[in-house]
Image: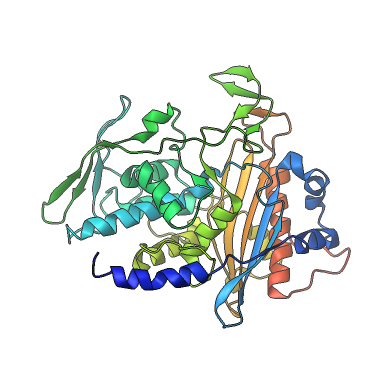
């Protein structure tokens, strides 16, 4: 660490001088006004009800020829948006960084090392088998990461969260400059916040019989979201244990990651060369970053391990910008890296799209809330009717703008 200190100090002036690219708010309303896509109409007519936010950022060169972002926003940070599964990637980054640190003591440790999670709650037992892993049915960091990234497994996210620890997940975000991020809980595990700070003992099982046990521990952050944060409540009632509880649902004790933080997190992974004005994931090893990039790019049917049928795992569910992009370019012409999410009526797409021929690229982060009856946890959200068509339309608009491709003539139909 002492040897690395001079190099780190040398980087600080450059980081301090790098400024966050400005945010333009004129372009997107103009593109929306020019569009004939009916999927935009209901959201544009009442964007506050839909809590709609769009952040579209082209990768361009600055005056010195360095890649930077040309940022265009619409209602960005107007209110709280629940990030759902879109923020899961952060836990993978934190887990990989912890593994790299552990390798300094245990040179045999790899992201394919078998893991065993000891029970920490009454309803758990020793967990050391992953049926999805074609290589020995072991639980491994790599398999957890891939299940999380490709088909958004809540189980995989929760284990990545346990590997890193709540405090570390948050610290990795804050050290990277993601200051509007707060990770408070696992997913699909309803329990008091204090329980989400408890982490199990984890065995690392080496190839020659080595065993290292990471002790069970309590690790967390002692804070919640501000009660006066705009939009921190949603809906008019919530269904809990079969009963309808009247009153808006509070998200004070829920995870938070703003639209700008979501986009920056993705940029740190897929385009670390882009100047964002933020430190980024400096401790994420290039080899680990490359594995994350591959998983975030693959559709379910492209994965060899785990094997995933697209009859069961619709790629458009996990890559909601894809249908809009296919109206602009054929699939073999672009790469799409993303992590989407949906829960409580919130639908998120966080994507980077690159033209494989021209290498032109852009980031697109879209958040929308669809809950016409105002009841949360009833399973009745307009994802298919409103949210996804809106994302398709925005993705098409931004792709045409980023790649300099004209829209079809008025009245012409683009594929849907």
Q: In this view, does 168 lie to the left or right of 246?
A: left
Q: Is residue 271 visible?
A: no
Which corner quadrant holds the N terminus?
Answer: bottom left
299 and 284: which is toward the camera: 284
- At horizontal 74% and vertical 60% (from top left) the residue drawn is 25
Q: Can residue 290 be seen in this view?
A: yes
Furthest toward the right, the residue is 411
Image location of residue 293, percent across then percent down: 45, 64
Compared to residue 323, the image places residue 249 above or below, namely above
Which corner quadrant holds the C terminus?
Answer: bottom right
Q: Quadrant of residue 128?
A: top left
293 and 325: which is toward the camera: 293
Furthest toward the bottom, the residue is 64
Q: Quadrant of residue 412?
A: bottom right
Q: In this view, does 80 lie to the left or right of 147?
A: right
Image location of residue 168, percent across then percent down: 36, 47
Q: Quadrant of residue 405?
A: bottom right
- At horizontal 18% and vertical 50% (from top left) the residue drawn is 205
**How many numbered circles are shown?**
0
Compared to residue 326, the image places residue 85 above or below, namely above
302 and 325: which is toward the camera: 325
Image location of residue 142, percent across then percent down: 34, 56
């Amino acid at each position: 660490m002492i040897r690395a200190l001079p190099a780190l100090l040398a980087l600080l002036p450059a980081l301090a001088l790098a400024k966050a690219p400005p945010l333009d708010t004129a372009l997107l309303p103009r593109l929306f006004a020019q569009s004939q896509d009916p999927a935009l109409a209901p959201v544009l007519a009442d964007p506050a009800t839909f809590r709609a936010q769009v952040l579209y950022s082209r990768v361009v060169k600055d005056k010195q020829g360095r890649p930077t972002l040309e940022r265009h926003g619409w209602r960005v940070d107007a209110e709280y948006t629940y990030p759902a599964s879109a923020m899961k990637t952060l836990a993978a980054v934190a887990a990989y960084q912890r593994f790299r640190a552990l390798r300094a003591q245990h040179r045999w440790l790899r992201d394919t090392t078998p893991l065993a999670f000891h029970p920490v709650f009454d309803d758990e037992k020793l967990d050391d088998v992953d049926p999805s892993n074609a290589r020995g049915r072991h639980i491994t960091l790599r398999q957890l990461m891939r299940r999380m990234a490709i088909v958004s497994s809540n189980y995989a996210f929760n284990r990545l969260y346990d590997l890193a620890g709540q405090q570390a997940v948050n610290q990795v975000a804050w050290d990277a400059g993601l200051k509007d991020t707060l990770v408070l809980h696992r997913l699909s595990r309803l329990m008091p916040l204090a329980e989400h700070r408890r982490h199990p003992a984890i065995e690392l099982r080496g190839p020659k019989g080595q065993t290292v046990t990471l002790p069970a521990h309590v690790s967390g952050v002692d804070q919640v979201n501000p009660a006066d944060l705009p939009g921190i409540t949603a809906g008019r009632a919530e269904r809990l244990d079969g009963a309808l509880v009247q009153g808006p649902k509070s998200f004070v004790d829920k995870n938070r990651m703003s639209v700008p933080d979501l986009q920056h997190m993705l940029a740190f992974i897929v385009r670390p060369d882009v100047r964002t004005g933020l430190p980024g994931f400096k401790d994420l090893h290039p080899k680990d970053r490359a594995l994350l990039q591959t998983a975030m790019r693959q559709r379910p049917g492209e994965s060899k391990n785990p094997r995933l049928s697209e009859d069961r795992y619709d790629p458009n569910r996990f890559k909601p910008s894809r249908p809009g992009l296919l109206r602009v370019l054929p699939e073999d012409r672009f790469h799409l890296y993303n992590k989407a999410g949906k829960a409580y009526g919130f639908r998120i797409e966080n994507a980077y799209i690159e033209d494989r021929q021209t290498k032109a690229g852009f980031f697109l982060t879209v958040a929308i809330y669809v809950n016409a009856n105002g009841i949360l946890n009833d399973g009745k959200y307009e994802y298919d009717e409103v949210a996804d068509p809106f994302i398709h339309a925005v993705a098409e608009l931004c792709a045409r703008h980023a790649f300099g491709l004209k829209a079809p003539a008025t009245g012409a139909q683009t594929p849907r």
